[in-house]
């Protein structure tokens, strides 16, 4: 079946596709906040009904957290493709930094083109809907789906995916397919279509240090009583040495050096680190000394302090000596680094630095190893050629500094290779105020999926 009429329909129906995306974006499906649990269920139900309209057998499956959307459809006899996305979104705080209501989406004209402005517009509702809209156009033109398809939409990706592994294990047979497609990544340097071949893992840890049994007056107790903020900041400052290396014992166990051929291929991409940093008001690389930017982003591990809390932080001044101080710390992992070993070593380091009268509590926030994709699977080159045709330039195999644990779970739980293709841009502000998704990215992403599915069906 020809892909040309499908592409023509995608072009002509872009306004309607954008309206459907707007409807989904209006649902505040913030998975990490229990107050939005009904909205997460509403987003799942919205997707179920939309998939049913395309001929899928679809349902929202209950979990201890938010529902999983699972759907099946398409003809037998060709490739069986599973497509994964997530319908939940990040919190919107600080709300005052948004230019408009995060859940009142709008298409805006900007100096860089038209953009969809709303929470979830890029991560991941807009990207998820590129695939759905490609299928909609295919069904409208050919009367059926292009191949056998399983749809798997998660509702907890932005809150650590606590229900994901149990659900995948319990439904492993139903979720089996020839290959998994994941649309939660982006273009390279905002212009080059890309297929992700390696991902960093992610480990999250929250620590709270307690000293006195209550907040104290800094005049009456200052100097005599231990301040937990002082303890916490000393620990956090010790996590990196002067050359940017991480000091957690055993942290670099399992970290490989990239080969010369891979390093040369990354150098050939022409990545402009000055522009990359300059776009966000920075100028100098801050990672390990002697490593080029793409190494720091794709193949080296990190330790980042994501938030600190303690004492009085409101307007004015309060001379308080706080009882507690806390921080959220995340580690991006590469190679064969063991997340659980790093968690234990980090905790041991913190405990070793505690002075008398202080105690610490830890709260884990997810742990997933790095991922490596099997590019020898024929679908990779098929997809790369289809992307190249759509964009009029060669698509690239690249790394990604982000962490998408589902890619590894497809392999470890379902023994299924995964291919990550996305159409986001670095300036989409996906976890920040004023998140956006370029209309062009949405449009070309939809066209790309139509081409990829057509090519995979033809070459099967």
Image (cartoon, helix red, strand yellow):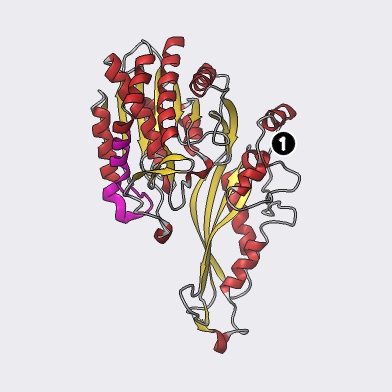
- Please determine whether, in this image, residue 310 is positioned above or below residue 390: below
Q: Nearer the viewer, residue 429 or 56?
A: 429
Q: Nearer the viewer, residue 284 or 245?
A: 284
443 horizontally vs 59: left or right: right
3 horizontally vs 188: left or right: left
| Horizontal and vertical percent position of residue 329 | 56, 56
Q: Secondary structure at mark 1?
A: loop
- Please determine whether, in this image, residue 222 is positioned above or below residue 147: below
Q: Nearer the viewer, residue 163 or 35?
A: 35
Q: Nearer the viewer, residue 234 or 127?
A: 127
Residue occupied by mark 1? 257
Query: How many numbered marks appear?
Result: 1
Q: Quadrant of residue 67?
A: top left
11 horizontally vs 385: left or right: left
Q: Residue at x 26, y 34 (%)?
A: 48
- Please determine whether, in this image, residue 286 is positioned above or below residue 111: below
Give the extent of the magenta segment: 18-39
Asked whether the viewer can see residue 395, the reply is yes
| Horizontal and vertical percent position of residue 160 | 44, 47
| Horizontal and vertical percent position of residue 176 | 40, 24
180 horizontally vs 353: left or right: left
Asked whether the viewer can see residue 300, the reply is no
Q: Residue at x 52, y 46 (%)?
A: 367
Q: Quadrant of the N terminus?
A: top left
The stretch drawn in magenta includes residue 36: yes
The stretch drawn in magenta includes residue 349: no
- Please determine whether, in this image, residue 245 is positioned above or below residue 226: above
């Amino acid at each position: 079946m020809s892909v040309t009429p499908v592409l023509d329909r995608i072009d002509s129906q872009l306004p309607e596709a954008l309206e459907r995306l707007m409807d989904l974006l209006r649902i505040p499906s913030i998975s990490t906040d229990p107050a939005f649990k009904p909205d997460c269920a509403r987003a799942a139900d919205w997707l179920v009904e939309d998939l049913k309209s395309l001929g899928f057998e679809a349902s929202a499956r209950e979990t201890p957290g938010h529902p999983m959307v699972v759907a099946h459809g398409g003809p037998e006899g060709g490739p069986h493709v599973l497509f994964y996305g997530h319908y939940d979104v990040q919190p919107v705080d600080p709300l005052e930094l948004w230019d408009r209501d995060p859940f009142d989406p709008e298409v805006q004209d900007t100096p860089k083109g038209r953009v969809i402005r709303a929470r979830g517009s890029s991560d991941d509702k807009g990207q998820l809907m590129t695939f759905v809209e490609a299928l909609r156009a295919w069904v409208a033109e050919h009367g059926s789906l292009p191949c056998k398809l399983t749809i798997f939409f998660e509702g907890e990706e932005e809150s650590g995916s606590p229900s994901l592994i149990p659900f995948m294990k319990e439904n492993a047979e139903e979720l089996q397919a020839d290959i998994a497609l994941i649309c939660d990544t982006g273009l390279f340097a905002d212009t080059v279509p890309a297929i992700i071949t390696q991902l960093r893992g992610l480990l999250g840890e929250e620590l709270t240090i307690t000293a006195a049994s209550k907040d104290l007056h800094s005049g009456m107790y200052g100097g005599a009583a231990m301040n937990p903020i002082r303890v916490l900041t000393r620990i956090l400052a010790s996590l990196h040495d002067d050359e940017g290396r991480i000091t957690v014992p055993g942290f670099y166990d399992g970290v490989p050096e990239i080969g010369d051929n891979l390093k040369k291929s990354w150098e050939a991409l022409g990545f402009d680190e000055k522009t990359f940093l300059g776009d966000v008001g920075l100028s100098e690389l801050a990672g390990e000394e002697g490593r080029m930017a793409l190494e720091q982003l794709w193949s080296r591990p990190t330790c980042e302090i994501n938030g600190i809390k303690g004492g009085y932080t409101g307007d004015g001044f309060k001379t308080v000596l706080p009882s507690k101080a806390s921080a959220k710390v995340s580690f991006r992992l590469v190679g064969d680094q063991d997340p659980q070993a790093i968690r234990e070593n980090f905790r041991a380091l913190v405990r070793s630095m505690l002075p008398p009268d202080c105690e610490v509590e830890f709260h884990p926030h997810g742990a997933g190893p790095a991922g490596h994709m099997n590019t020898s699977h024929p679908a990779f080159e098929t997809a790369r050629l289809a992307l190249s045709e759509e964009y009029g330039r060669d698509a690239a195999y690249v790394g990604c500094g982000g962490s998408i644990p589902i890619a590894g779970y497809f392999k470890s739980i379902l023994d299924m290779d995964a291919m990550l293709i996305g159409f986001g841009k670095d300036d989409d502000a996906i976890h920040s105020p004023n998140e956006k998704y370029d209309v062009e990215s949405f449009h070309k992403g939809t066209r790309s999926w139509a081409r990829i599915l057509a090519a995979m069906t033809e070459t099967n």
